[in-house]
Amino acid sequence: MSRMRALSAGIGKRYSDHFAICLIQHANYFLNRQIPGLEKDFVEKVTVRKRVATARLAHRGRPPRLTGLALQTNISPLPDNDCQKRRSGLREGVNSSPTSPMLALNLEVVRKIGLARAFLGLAQVAARSANDFNLYVATNHMQDAVEIFLFAVAEHIGVGLKERSAFDGYFEQINLKTGKELPFRSRLNALNKTRVSSKHYGVQPERREVQGFLVVVGEFFEEICSDLLNVDLSQISLVQLISNERVRNAMSNANDAFLHGRYKEVLIESRKAFYQEFEISYDVSSFIGERDSQRWTGFCCAAPRYARSGDYIGKNVKEPTDFIVLDHSKIDADLAKCGLSHTTFWNVWRLTPALFLLKDSDKWIVRHEAQVFSEDGIRERAEYVLHATIDLCLSAQRNREATRIGPYATWTIRLREAGVSLYEKADKKSMSQPLPGGMTEIPALFWVNGLDGGIYWNVALLESFRLGFVSNDDVDK
């Protein structure tokens, strides 16, 4: 400083102001030269950190995390003879998948993480724009993504964050609960300050700084999911909460198709999930011809009674998708009872192509309708159908899980002799037929006092397709 004062005094007061400006310009020049090097160091340090995290996961015996940040929703029909699962229409049974770490996350946590990833995706799109105004958008979307993600993590570990707390306070509360230091704390605090400056004071963020923040936020999401949530970020989606494996796989395929711009495939795969969840019990194809087995098929089928006949099929089924005959009044009643959106249900039904599943070959028949597959607005329709179908399937699943029924059980009764009478009603005066020869022990669903005052056992013989009542007088006491 003494040398600077001496030099300034030597130059004289007239030139001191110009000299100061010259020094400022030189300092600015060197700082601008230093910025690219600092950015390079920052990116390389993040890359090193990522390699360290991958090595740490490998040491723990877990696979490295995927790097994709797109909102992914990655993921067999019900048995034909499973009447108990098919007869209940909207409440049909599900095939549970093996337990996975995803099942430890509740629905609201998954929703918040999905929303955070969506905001981050919007920030990535805005950052790629050449318009500098989108730098403001990207910065604010990133900050929203981080805050929502922190709330999801806090909910998962049981920390109640206060919405009006300081941003850095979120990190402090989570650190105290977990006993670990969240990564990238200083860089994310810098993001918060940049967001405040851009939103409240109109200070434009630097493009290079925004790009660096995108890397940090992506790494933050991946590392937290791995270390605290014990699941890969790319595996977190609402689809993974669907317990029916076939429905889950179809929705996973639909989401993957949407990410790759295959919107017609989105509509088809979403309808497959919709079919498995809601339409499969309305299949009347089993009523072709005249067979005794149709008694039990009719008991399981939810289609209107008039459609459960070979005569109806012969007159009205013109192509395979006509085998699905919906009972609209029953569906509307079930939707209201289950708390499902009537409008959303029928919107998905209208916006997707009609399907039919061939039971023997497990092959799908698709009705390719020009109106459904029209290119005009197909992306918007596909996006709506994708999210609406997921919500419908999860709502139906929650309703099933809330329904409580006892285990299936039967009585075993021993008959006095073979060939006793099987009555149509719990009354000896009703029509009857002899039981098949040789049967001395049969299963019974219940016993009850009959119409004539006697005791009767209700039996269902699946092998011979017979249903009726056996008098207690014919049972070996």
Image: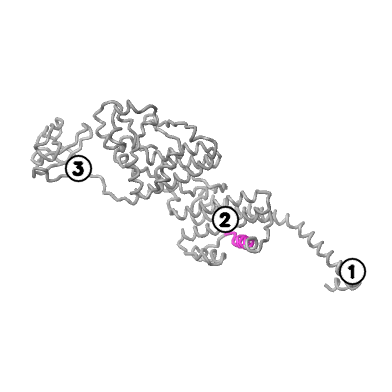
**Gap between marks 1 and 2 measured at Cα:** 52 Å
Front position among marks 1 and 2? 1
Amino acid type of the residue that numbered disc 1 sits on in the rendered structure: Tyr
State which quadrant residue 146 falls in: bottom right
Amino acid type of the residue that numbered disc 3 sits on in the rendered structure: Leu
Write down the residue under mark 3.
445
- Which of marks 3 and 2 precedes in the sequence? 2
Q: Residue at x 28, y 25 (%)?
A: 289
Query: Left or right of 386: which side holds 435?
Result: left
Q: Report the disc number at residue 220.
A: 2
**Gap between marks 2 and 3 measured at Cα:** 58 Å
Tag 2 secondary structure: helix
- Which of marks 2 and 1 precedes in the sequence? 1
| Span of residues in magenta | 183-195
Viewer-closest of 140 and 444: 140
State which quadrant residue 468 falls in: top left
Write down the residue under mark 1.
15
Tag 3 secondary structure: strand
Spot occupied by residue 18 in the image (x, y as percentages of width and height): 86, 66
